[in-house]
Amino acid sequence: MPTLATAITTPDPAALEEWLDATPDRGERERQLRDLAAPDRARLVAGMQPELADRLLAVIEPRTAATLLTSASPAAAAGLLAALDSDIAADILREFPATTAASLIGALPPARALVLNGLLSWPPDSAAAHMVPEALVISQGQDVESALTQLRLQTAAAPVDSLAAAYVYVVDDDRRLLGVVSLQQLVLAAPGTQVAELTETDIITVDANTDDEVAARTLTDNRLAALPVIDKEDRLLGVITADVAADIVEDENTEDAERQGGSEPLEVPYLQASPVRLWRKRVVWLLVLFIAEAYTGTVLRYFEDELDAVVSLAFFIPLLVGTGGNTGTQITTTLVRAASTGEVRLRDLGKVLPKELSAAMMISATMAAVGLLRAWTLGVGWPVMVTVSISLAAIVLWSAFVASILPLILTKTKIDPAVVSAPMIATIVDGTGLLIYFMIAKSIIPELSH
Amino acid sequence: MPTLATAITTPDPAALEEWLDATPDRGERERQLRDLAAPDRARLVAGMQPELADRLLAVIEPRTAATLLTSASPAAAAGLLAALDSDIAADILREFPATTAASLIGALPPARALVLNGLLSWPPDSAAAHMVPEALVISQGQDVESALTQLRLQTAAAPVDSLAAAYVYVVDDDRRLLGVVSLQQLVLAAPGTQVAELTETDIITVDANTDDEVAARTLTDNRLAALPVIDKEDRLLGVITADVAADIVEDENTEDAERQGGSEPLEVPYLQASPVRLWRKRVVWLLVLFIAEAYTGTVLRYFEDELDAVVSLAFFIPLLVGTGGNTGTQITTTLVRAASTGEVRLRDLGKVLPKELSAAMMISATMAAVGLLRAWTLGVGWPVMVTVSISLAAIVLWSAFVASILPLILTKTKIDPAVVSAPMIATIVDGTGLLIYFMIAKSIIPELSH
């Protein structure tokens, strides 16, 4: 299998195309690009044909593409950017400082510069920021032959994105969206067919300012190749394509995973995150959780006399709080995921809570049984054994209750339910779990019931 | 906004189409379908036109679609299945018991039954199980006009999936894949252009037996609308489309999230999982973790005399093990996610470990400082304060080390790195963290150093 390093040194420019075809794994491409020495990187960019740029820069991280372009002269970089689909070019340009991006755009043909400046002017998390403005559009009231002629004229300069081209949009003179017809139907219709006969007028669209994640989910929820983005006057601004929607959903999944791990999202690919960034994104939640967890110390000091009298109670502290945290974590991760895909909302609480509490009853009984067994093997005597067993049952139920409700409540707020992380649920359950444990201990163990 | 319940009672069949267009959110559609009473469900299916079936059944959970079809007569159900893309129909058929699926397929036209039986014969997690067998194919050595004529004949019966139709595949007489041309280029080329001039012969393909997740990632990694699936003789069997790839990636993400929460994957949509299923998928890991966590009791009993002598040491147990677990969870979730998207592999350990340990040093110093402060507020005296502070620093480093290595090692095995869950890392760190704590305590606190 050819490596990038050898492909660069081969005089044949096709060697790079071959490398790309033989390396369909994005992670592997990133790895080989990252490992390139600076002179090799400069050589790669210097010898890059626009066709290769169109293929390569579209299928690597925008940050990596920006780093590559930095090795080229501004004119050469602009030349390569010109070869890309507009949405991809805009993604890469967002990785540059504003002044560098502006000078790169300045070196592009005016029509193209206008399109890219337009894309960059939208808020980065809006649907419009991620669209391809160049959709296939035709006017109404014609037959398929003349429609195809109109499309040929429109795409003579450059073909549009292949996913965007799955659909042809019918618009009026003000570019207001009237309907959609699939390119396939247009092409394969019997000659003489009127476009109107093939046009679907009920169209799923998103407004330009729609949140990009909502737009991406709308596209995938409806198995579309492309989703039209319109302005307030129903004018077609562009389309979001399925590949970009997949990127947006994947980025959202990565952010959710990071939040669920009790960290702020890194916002850059992991291998490109510096240790200082890792520290900064992680330490905030660690401190919040530390402060929240600190009250376990207060609880334990409050029960100091009980601990002193029956020191074996301490043996089970990690086991009890650990099991409570595990039970809660199982529930929140499942619910956060279901909330993230749109499967559950707050109004499903009436279905979620009975289901979770039923499952928790069974788990509670199981854990009470094994807890009794474990306490017996430590030889702590009946009163502590019973205390541990009942406490486990109670903590599991309490944890399930908290973990079922919290993420669902957050679906109604601006806060991402994913912040109800494994560490957070464990922290909430730790202190309350200890309270439950010692209260049960005081009512069961003779030495403590004074 | 129309609801499904009102749309069903409207005599106009277009009401259901309107409901579908007005409800682009998949979760909301599922909710309304689920809330339908059995007679309404039967009425919905009885009145369903094939065009509506094609749209509706493709954009709901296969399980929900199967439930709907169960309300219809076998003949009616088969009629609706016939309207669907083959990959969608196969997904729904997999939800039925084998005998029911076989009888439904038996009621289909023979050509169609052959295609569906073919799809169902592949292992469910293979690329071939998820393909659309009906791709657009043309033979080599012709110009674009005759190619389009060939396509018109091929699709006269039914248009192919609109994502699959983004590309036209050039095959030889044995259906061996020779190249690909985008439908757009074929249509918009100047009349008289030879197909060969437009054909790209370097094609990314997957073998029929490729794991479906690998195939889906290959498609998204390369921003494709469809990915050809070939057999060992390079014959084109069908294509995986971007919408199905998105489903596969989303299912994988859900499974990973569930594993990361310390549970077995539910394998069904959350709201369709019974409490017994929840219990079954969760209790296994809870028991494993309980047994692993139980050794914290052994550690604590071993240090019973120390605890008895300095009971204030117990105050910090949940805080110390909690912070260790939180640090480890942050790292594993980030790494498991990066491994799942293919960004990191075991061979990146040389980059991951120094990065994580550098970040951990900073976190370690931060936590040691706040730990000292917290111990001071509890008034436990200098020796315990210093013990807590140094232990926090040591536990954070130890946890970071374990959490960095474990998920990466698993990328080299058959085990999904996602099993290194928040609860698992917390459990590993709990017992070892306590050992670290008491060893530091014994060497620092005068009463214990005998």
Image: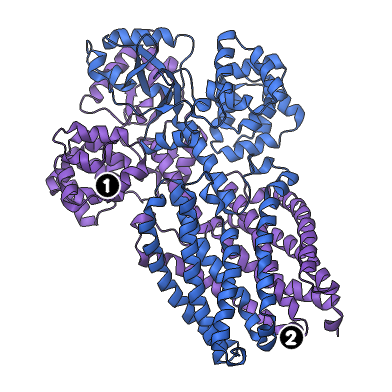
Chain colours: A blue, B purple
The residue sitting at 87% across, 80% down in the picture is: B446
Q: Are marks 1 and 2 on the same chain?
A: yes
Q: Residue furthest front?
A: A450
> Residue type at mark 1?
Leu
Image quadrant where one finds the N terminus of chain B = top left
Q: Identify which residue, B43 or B361, lies in the foreground.
A: B43
Residue B149 in sight in this render: yes
Q: Quadrant of residue B177?
A: top left
Per the model, the C-alpha gap separating discs 1 and 2 is 61 Å
Residue that carries the numbered disc 2 in the rendered image: B308
Where in the figure is residue B348, as x and y percent of width and height?
Answer: 67, 48
Residue at screen point 22% across, 15% down: A190
Secondary element type, mark 2: helix
Considering the numbered disc 1 on the image, is that residue within a helix, a strand or a loop?
helix
Q: Quadrant of residue B138?
A: top left
Count residues near mark 1 (Cα–Cα under 10 Å), then give few for <14, some for 14-19, many for 20+: some
- Say which of B355 and B158 sits in front: B355
Q: Residues within 10 Å of mark 2 (few under 14, many from 20)?
A: some
Question: Residue at 31% across / 43% down in the picture?
Answer: B29
Q: Quadrant of residue A381?
A: bottom right
Q: Is residue B210 visible?
A: no
Q: What amino acid type is highlighted by mark number 2?
A: Asp
> Which residue bears the numbered disc 1?
B33
Q: Relative to residue A241, is residue A329 depicted above or below?
A: below
Looking at the image, tell me whether mark 1 or mark 2 is earlier in sequence order: 1
Return the x and y of residue A402 as percentages of the image width and height: 49, 63
Q: Chain of mark 2?
A: B
Rendered location of residue A61, percent (x, y):
60, 33
Q: Chain of mark 1?
A: B
